[in-house]
């Protein structure tokens, strides 16, 4: 309770100008000026400012709480040079599409193979009733809540978070329903009944800045395929950029097509009257499996987007937006190499079927431009002849090995691989440290391995015992793909007692954001929980991130659905030398994974890194040290540990962090009777990174 800190004259001003308004509509009971924000109120207007950077720069939002008026009468930046009014008389806009989730299958809320978009749904423009406004302080954040919002059976409020130290804010319609089995999509942005902006800017898919000066109020709405998921409006004295959380906004699809994720103009979806700009979802996705976002009953779904302010013109603000995702690239870290896994590009099938193939295929150009050093394939998934007894399969494997060798050069290594999905149950991935020829069946009387003139050793694998023998013979690794969902529903749980799973040849599982749930401050809990379960089973298993994507081209929206592994590999192996160092890092847990905005260059518990074993004395506390590099302001660090039965969580609030930082954090944790400990870090856009366990003895 900080309201007693306000100067007496300010309290008198609130009482003198609008007694009914101040008593019933403005709540400052959890607000403090100590972090540099200010609140002023008069005649139905509430003005909130926050420190937005150097040179005394402040961001300013002026709320018009009178019924029938646009919520934002003005959005400004101010500095030593004066006030830069960026936009006037605009409303936040949210469109909510509500469909039905199929919970009849074993997947439950973890379902991917749902067809929500093909079934009936309802679309609503979320309404805002300006009943009251609350301003709160949380670390270096100011949170503004405006009540109330409604869309069909969903109710909630508008929540605006101001991030001190930068001209960045987040706008969210926080909505929930008591109805069960709901799946949702949302579009959002800013809208005005008048001509609120002078020019619109965006980057086309090749990275070239484009613009439109046709911002008249009769401009029909247009959806745009863009790079960086951003649309920019230029006003009289500056610009604002609108963009979504870079990964959270992309529910899982098989294909990373660019589905025109921004829009501008009037009449958007025939639900918007004025001229708007914003972000959008395509209701039909990639026209395959389109699961939308989960919306379980009584969960606060954050339909949110970011706004960045600048006094610059001509779209220059895009450079500031790009910094939040390292320009959609994975930042190099000394001593690490980046690996992306599980791609069904079917490049080999394109060659086999005589399709025109460029010398450097699109998926290689796309991933190399993003800073991916290692691409692990999952070829012949829906093509080729993976179950063939040899005549077709062996030449197909040879083609994959030759093409992988050809396309590996410089700072890029293409590792051949498959999603074999035989003998073990569920779906799983494999990797060998060199090209290995193997056939997925073995008839009675056929040898397990034989020498051939054309291919050298050829293995025939007829059952799970053979498969383990092959992995052991060739030092290979296997792991569960998309664990506990899709074709791996129920796995690896169903084979946790099998010899192959307990073997050191079975590395664990893979992480991807399936399902997507906007009520969570993190992503991919399905597999993060599995890490903890496997550790409590007593198995030293690890989890890499997986893309699980099909065709890729440079103009696709690849960064949003992607994730990355940072492997502790000093030098990238050459294809012809084999890639055992990559597999060593995977097998020993010497890596961290995440979305790319949050990086963990170092992590240790009493000096032991992930995958290592820590010997503890009874009652001894351990010191956790982690270096975090970030772009968006951080949300929290979570220390997770287990004792073989239970999972323990300790969350450390990081609301005092600002945009763009690098810091060593140190914590004490009691590891008495614990058998493992790991760490996660998440930012305000639900981007994050997680380590592998440190084992405790």
Image: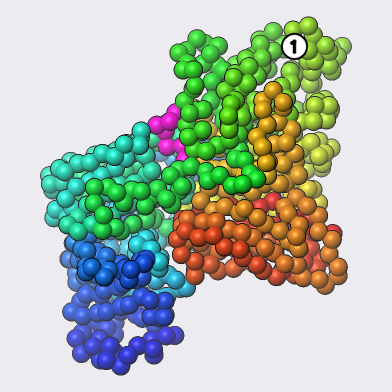
Query: What percent of the width, then of the height, locates residue 509?
Result: 68, 42
Bounds of the magenta span? 553-560
Using the image, determine if residue 532 lies above or below residue 399: below
Quarter of the image with the C terminus in it: bottom right
Q: Locate residue 43: give its quadrant.
A: bottom left
Quarter of the image with the N terminus in it: bottom left
Q: Which residue: 55% across, 11% down?
A: 352
Q: What kind of element bears circle 1? A: loop
**Magenta stretch contains residue 146:** no
Q: Which residue: 61% across, 29% down?
A: 413
Using the image, determine if residue 428 lies above or below residue 646: above
Per the image, the residue denoted by label 1 is: 455
Query: What percent of the width, then of the height, locates residue 163?
Result: 40, 65
Q: Which residue: 32% across, 61% down?
A: 150
Task: Give the side of residue 673 with respect to residue 69, left or right.
Answer: right
Give the mark count: 1
- Mostly what secondary structure, the magenta segment? loop
């Amino acid at each position: 309770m900080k309201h007693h800190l306000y100067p007496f004259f300010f309290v008198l001003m609130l009482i003198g100008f609008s007694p009914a308004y101040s008593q019933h509509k403005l709540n400052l009971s959890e607000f403090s000026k100590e972090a540099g924000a200010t609140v002023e109120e008069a005649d139905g207007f509430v003005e909130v400012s926050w420190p937005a950077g150097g040179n005394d720069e402040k961001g300013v939002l002026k709320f018009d709480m009178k019924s029938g008026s646009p919520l934002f009468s003005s959005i400004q930046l101010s500095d030593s040079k004066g006030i830069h009014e960026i936009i006037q008389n605009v409303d936040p806009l949210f469109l909510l599409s509500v469909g039905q989730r199929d919970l009849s299958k074993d997947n439950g809320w973890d379902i991917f193979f749902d067809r929500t978009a093909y079934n009936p749904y309802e679309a609503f423009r979320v309404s805002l009733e300006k009943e009251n406004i609350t301003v709160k302080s949380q670390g270096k954040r100011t949170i503004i809540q405006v009540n109330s919002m409604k869309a069909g059976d969903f109710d909630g409020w508008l929540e605006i978070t101001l991030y001190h130290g930068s001209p960045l804010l987040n706008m969210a319609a926080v909505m929930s329903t008591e109805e069960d089995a709901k799946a949702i999509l949302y579009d959002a942005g800013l809208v005005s009944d008048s001509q609120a902006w002078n020019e619109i800017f965006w980057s086309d898919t090749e990275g070239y800045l484009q613009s439109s000066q046709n911002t008249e109020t009769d401009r029909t709405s247009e959806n745009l395929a863009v790079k960086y998921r951003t649309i920019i409006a230029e006003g009289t004295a500056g610009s604002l950029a609108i963009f979504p959380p870079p990964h959270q906004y992309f529910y899982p699809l098989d294909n990373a097509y660019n589905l025109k994720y921004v829009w501008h103009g009037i009449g958007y979806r025939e639900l918007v009257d004025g001229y708007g700009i914003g972000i959008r979802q395509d209701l039909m996705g990639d026209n395959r499996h389109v699961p939308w976002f989960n919306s379980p009953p009584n969960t606060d779904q954050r339909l949110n987007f970011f706004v960045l302010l600048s006094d610059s013109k001509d779209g220059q603000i895009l450079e500031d937006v790009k910094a939040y995702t390292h320009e959609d690239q994975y930042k190099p870290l000394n001593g690490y190499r980046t690996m992306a896994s599980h791609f069904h590009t079917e490049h080999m099938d394109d060659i086999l079927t005589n399709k025109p193939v460029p010398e450097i295929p699109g998926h290689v150009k796309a991933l190399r431009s993003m800073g991916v050093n290692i691409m692990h394939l999952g070829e012949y998934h829906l093509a080729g002849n993976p179950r063939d007894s040899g005549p077709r399969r062996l030449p197909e494997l040879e083609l994959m090995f030759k093409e992988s060798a050809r396309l590996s050069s410089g700072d890029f290594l293409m590792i051949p691989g498959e999603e074999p999905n035989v003998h073990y149950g569920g779906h799983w991935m494999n990797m060998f440290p060199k090209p290995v020829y193997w056939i997925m069946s073995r008839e009675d009387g056929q040898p397990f391995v034989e020498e051939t003139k054309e291919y050298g050793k050829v293995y025939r694998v007829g059952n799970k015992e053979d498969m383990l023998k092959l992995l052991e013979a060739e030092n290979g690794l296997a792991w569960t793909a998309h664990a506990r969902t899709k074709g791996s529903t129920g796995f690896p749980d169903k084979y946790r007692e099998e010899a192959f799973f307990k073997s050191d040849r079975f590395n664990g599982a893979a992480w991807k954001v399936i399902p997507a749930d906007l009520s969570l401050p993190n992503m991919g809990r399905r597999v993060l929980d599995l890490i903890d379960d496997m550790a409590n089973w007593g198995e030293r298993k690890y989890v890499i991130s997986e893309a699980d994507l099909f065709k890729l081209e440079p103009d696709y929206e690849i960064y949003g659905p992607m994730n990355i592994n940072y492997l502790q590999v000093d030098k990238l192996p050459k294809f012809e030398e084999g890639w055992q160092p990559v597999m060593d890092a995977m097998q020993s847990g010497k890596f961290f994974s995440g979305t790319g905005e949050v990086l963990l260059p170092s992590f240790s518990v009493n000096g032991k890194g992930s995958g290592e074993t820590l010997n503890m004395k009874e009652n001894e506390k351990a010191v956790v040290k982690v270096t975090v590099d970030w772009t968006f302001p951080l949300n929290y660090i979570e220390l997770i540990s287990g004792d073989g039965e239970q999972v323990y969580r300790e969350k450390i609030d990081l609301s005092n962090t600002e945009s763009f930082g690098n810091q060593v954090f140190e914590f004490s944790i009691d590891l008495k009777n614990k058998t493992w400990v790991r760490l996660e870090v998440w930012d305000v856009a639900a981007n994050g990174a997680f380590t592998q366990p440190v084992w405790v003895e």
